[in-house]
Image: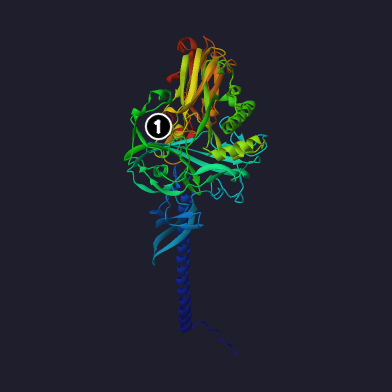
């Protein structure tokens, strides 16, 4: 029987189409969901990255109050960004918290004297619109005002609270000198952690900051002291308020003079009711808020004075001059000062960071100032001489001995002098030795420990060696053919959008071919001697220390000198600023006589600078004959020099002092970025 082949009927086909259609429709719907979810996930990821990016911006602060980006400036805010056509609205809230060491708790209430909070709680919200209306992501985090590597206290009175071990890299001489805290040379060491104190301006005030680090021979940090010294114009109405008596450093010994631990500890100030002040209307520095509010002696009670050499409670004054120089100190009288009990007055304070806050401590006490050639201290043997001199000076202060011999730091004696090899420019250095005020009991305990032969006695004394070169006054006091720089104190600018050059020179000594005479340096003994500001009273104006040296010129001859300026782009914005001093210090300078192809071996060229962030840089080339003709050129890495070379004709250009100088010898060096922005001029 023959079978007939059959196909799909119309009804079957229609049923199949319906079934397939339903399946395809579901698949299309599902695919739309997948695509929409995928797009939403991408958008959500972008939003989270925007939140993380803002948090990273906050984490990049470089100082609490005085950097380019400050911790205290992190506050609530919002912005709007568009990524791949999608608009995101980003907002953040910032809550400040303060740590109470006494209770071990956190509070949103700002304590008296706090410059900043200890911690910020940050919530970042990023929102966007979508098909369902809107969506958002939230990121929560916190920021600390200090590194987790730092100890909570600048000096910890608890011997068992050793804190984390942090590796410290010692500084380099001659800018930073490590002082042995043991007379046998094998104990801990102490040094300032910056080549020179960092100077900045705040609403007419000069803020000077540096750290002092005590570390072990293996370079493990034990104690880091964060100092800030500032001058302020303050205002008082004579009213009283709760404010601190001075925090005071002292040796860690018990009431019987027995050593608890070989370290310096800090006695906290006490909150008492006393006269108080506030920054004048033209001064908004947070440091001045602490200074003006607390730098009054208590009128009653057994509390330390800020300056024990003054009768407590000390008075406050205005000064009727707009400038001051220690070399005019003898011209000032009481008529230049007016006592203030209601109104504006001048103040200068020394602050120490304790428990995360800057607290007003007892004033600085300068016990000696030492002048020398900067290159003299580059020699290792001379460094040893200076280190021993400092320890002997501290010992003399404690015991009344006379072991410190400044003659050992001189190039020559009768008279005490520095020797300059040839006509040209050299950089002088001034170093100050400070010892904190000690009570009679503390001083007697330390004298006894020294007399007992205990080699570790220096670790018990709050003393400091500070490079004051750019903060003290310089002057040629006699002779001819000598000049020394004493330019106005400037500071590094933090505005990213404007060109700013804040370097200045002090202590650069120019020596003519037939020079002779004396150069001197002076520094006031208290806080305003660190800030270089106007005196706060007559005693402040007239009490200073001086070191003076005759200048001995070994050989005359001719020299070329000039300013060597260096420009680089600021980290943010389209503006230029001064390079770090290490850049011009590394410049190679070559003098080539006309007709020669190589450097003249008789010519010696050096870069002259005090060092540090604020120091101006010069160069000096010596050893020219009276008929020398040729050119001077400079090179460093990929930097451009303008002009590319300097033409020198000694016979026609040198002045009567044997010097070629002025605008014709000035050189500007620029980083590649400055050149590409057409700013190297």
Quadrant where the image shows the N terminus: bottom right
User: Badge 1 local density, few (<14 within 10 Å), some, or many (20+)?
Assistant: many
What kind of colouring is applied to the model shown?
rainbow
| Residue to which mark 1 is pinned | 535
Q: Assign a secondary structure to mark 1.
A: loop
The answer to whether residue 321 shows anywhere in this view is: no
> Residue placed farthest to the bottom in the image?
1
Of the pair 314 and 326, the residue shown nearer to us: 314
Locate residue 95: give its quadrant: bottom left
Locate residue 422: give its quadrant: top right
Quadrant where the image shows the C terminus: top left
The answer to whether residue 313 shows anywhere in this view is: yes
Asked if residue 279 is positioned above or below residue 556 in the image, the reply reads below
Of the pair 49 and 225, the residue shown nearer to us: 225
Q: In the rendering, at what x and y percent does residue 81 appear? A: 40, 53
Q: In the rendering, at what x and y percent does residue 455 appear? A: 66, 36
Q: In the rendering, at what x and y percent does residue 273 appear? A: 40, 49
Of the pair 512 and 298, the residue shown nearer to us: 298
Please tell me how many numbered marks the rendered image carries. 1
Which residue appears at 50% of the width and 55% of the height?
Answer: 102
Q: Is residue 502 left or right of residue 322?
A: right
């Amino acid at each position: 029987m023959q079978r007939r082949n059959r196909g799909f009927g119309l009804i079957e086909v229609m049923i199949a189409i319906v079934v397939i259609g339903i399946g395809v429709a579901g698949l299309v719907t599902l695919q739309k969901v997948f695509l929409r979810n995928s797009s939403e996930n991408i958008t959500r990821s972008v939003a989270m990255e925007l939140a993380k990016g803002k948090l990273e911006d906050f984490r990049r602060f470089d100082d609490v109050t005085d950097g380019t980006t400050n911790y205290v400036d992190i506050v609530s805010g919002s912005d709007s960004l568009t990524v791949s056509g999608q608009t995101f609205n980003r907002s953040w809230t910032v809550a400040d918290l303060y740590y109470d060491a006494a209770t071990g708790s956190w509070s949103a209430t700002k304590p008296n004297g706090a410059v900043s909070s200890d911690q910020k709680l940050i919530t970042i919200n990023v929102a966007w619109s979508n098909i369902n209306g809107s969506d958002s992501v939230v990121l929560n985090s916190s920021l600390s005002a200090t590194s987790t590597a730092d100890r909570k206290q600048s000096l910890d009175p608890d011997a068992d609270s050793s804190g984390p071990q942090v590796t410290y890299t010692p500084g380099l001489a001659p800018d930073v000198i490590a002082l042995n805290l043991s007379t046998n040379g094998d104990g801990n060491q102490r040094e300032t952690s910056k080549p020179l104190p960092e100077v900045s301006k705040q609403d007419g005030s000069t803020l000077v900051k540096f750290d002092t680090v005590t570390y072990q021979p293996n370079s493990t940090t034990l104690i880091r002291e964060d100092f800030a010294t500032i001058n302020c114009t303050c205002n008082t109405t004579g009213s009283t308020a709760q404010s601190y008596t001075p925090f005071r450093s002292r040796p860690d010994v018990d009431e019987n003079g027995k050593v608890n631990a070989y370290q310096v500890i800090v006695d906290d100030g006490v909150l008492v009711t006393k006269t108080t002040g506030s920054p004048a209307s033209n001064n908004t520095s947070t440091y001045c808020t602490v200074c003006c509010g607390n730098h009054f002696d208590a009128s009653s009670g057994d509390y330390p004075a800020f300056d024990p050499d003054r009768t407590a409670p000390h008075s406050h004054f205005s000064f009727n001059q707009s400038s001051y120089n220690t070399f005019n100190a003898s011209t000032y009288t009481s008529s230049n000062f007016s006592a203030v009990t209601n109104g504006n007055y001048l103040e200068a304070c020394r602050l120490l960071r304790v428990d995360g806050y800057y607290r007003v401590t007892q004033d600085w006490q300068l016990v000696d100032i030492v002048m020398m050639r900067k290159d003299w201290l580059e020699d290792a043997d001379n460094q040893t001489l200076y280190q021993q001199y400092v320890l002997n000076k501290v010992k003399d202060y404690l015991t009344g001995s006379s072991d410190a011999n400044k003659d050992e730091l001189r190039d020559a004696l009768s008279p005490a002098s520095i020797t300059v090899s040839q006509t040209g420019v050299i950089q002088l250095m001034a170093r100050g030795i400070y010892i904190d005020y000690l009570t009679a009991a503390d001083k007697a305990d330390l004298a006894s420990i020294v007399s007992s032969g205990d080699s570790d006695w220096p670790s018990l004394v709050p003393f400091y060696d500070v490079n004051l070169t750019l903060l003290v006054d310089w002057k040629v006091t006699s002779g001819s053919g000598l000049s020394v720089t004493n330019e106005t104190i400037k500071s590094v600018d933090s505005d990213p959008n404007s060109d700013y050059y804040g370097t200045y020179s002090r202590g650069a000594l120019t020596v003519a071919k037939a020079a002779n005479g004396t150069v001197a340096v002076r520094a006031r003994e208290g806080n305003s001697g660190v800030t270089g500001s106007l005196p706060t009273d007559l005693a402040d104006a007239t009490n200073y220390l001086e070191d003076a040296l005759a200048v001995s010129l070994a050989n005359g001859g001719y020299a070329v000198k000039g300013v060597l300026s260096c420009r680089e782009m600021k980290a943010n914005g389209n503006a230029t600023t001064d390079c770090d001093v290490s850049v011009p210090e590394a410049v190679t300078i070559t003098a080539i006589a006309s007709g020669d192809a190589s450097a003249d071996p008789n010519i010696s060229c050096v870069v002259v600078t005090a060092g540090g962030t604020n120091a101006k840089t010069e160069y000096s080339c010596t050893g020219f004959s009276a008929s020398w003709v040729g050119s001077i050129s400079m090179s460093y890495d990929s930097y451009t020099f303008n002009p590319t070379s300097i033409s020198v004709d000694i016979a026609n250009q040198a002045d009567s002092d044997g010097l070629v100088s002025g605008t014709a010898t000035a050189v500007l060096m620029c980083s590649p970025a400055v050149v590409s922005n057409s700013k190297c001029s």
